Amino acid sequence: MATALATFAPVRLWSSDLSRALQTAEYVAAATGLPIEPDARLREYDVGKRSGLTIEEFAAAYPEEHAAWLVGDDSTLVPGEETTTQVRERVLPALLECWQQVPAGETGVVVLHGACLKVGLMGMVGWPWELSRSLRGVENGAYSVVSEHPLRGHLVLTSYNEKAVGTAHGPDFATDGRVG
């Protein structure tokens, strides 16, 4: 993936300050020669007390919260869990600042986590959150591209959930029983 991203000739590289994203960013930094600019606002959702639990463990330990999560209801959360609105209010300004710091005609790379990336991308292009269930989350090791519309100037999602050549996307949610 780092080699694929290097072909975009990025001029800036930001990353979540969490270890998994930083490890990925280190590969991108090695391939591009860019320093990593960590930003805590790019962290994944804080899922509070369910952190580290499998979906099955989450369902067993917090059945009401799990049922609400399945239908996208943010009103019933485990202690310490962020709402999608909170994540969007944290991630979107960070992504827009990154965007604004890249000179016109240049490329920047932001390494973050799949669920918060989906929230941030939807915010960048102005999509209402009600459409979120029709958009699969960004997979590990995948990238998306946002660009400016050449005539109208607004941001557009140019590419979504792309994988490096020779890698496959994960199984379909409908056939493998996973929950997105």
Image (cartoon, rainbow, N blue to C red):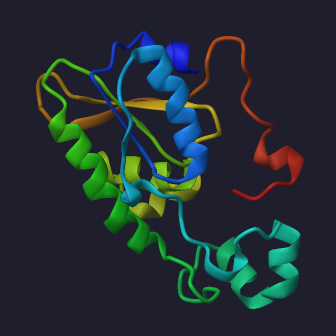
Task: For residue 136, say whether it is visible.
Answer: no
Vertically, is 140 above or below 7? below
Q: Position of residue 58 (x, y in %)?
A: 80, 77
Image quarter in which the N terminus is found: top right
Count the labels in the image.
0
Q: Nearer the viewer, residue 131 or 136?
A: 136
Vertically, is 68 above or below 19? below
Q: Position of residue 77 (x, y in %)?
A: 61, 86
Left/right of residue 91 with respect to residue 153 in the rendered view: right
Image quarter in which the C terminus is found: bottom right
| Residue at 38% in and 64% down | 88
| Residue at 19% in and 30% down | 102
Vertically, is 126 above or below 31? below
Looking at the rendering, which quadrant does residue 139 occupy? top right
Q: Position of residue 141 (x, y in %)?
A: 62, 32
Q: Nearer the viewer, residue 50 or 123?
A: 50
Q: Position of residue 140 (x, y in %)?
A: 65, 39
Task: For residue 103, say whether it is visible.
Answer: yes
Left/right of residue 75 with respect to residue 91 in the rendered view: right
| Residue at 80% in and 70% down | 53
Vertically, is 33 above or below 149? above
Q: Nearer the viewer, residue 78 or 14?
A: 14
Looking at the rendering, which quadrant does residue 147 occupy? top left
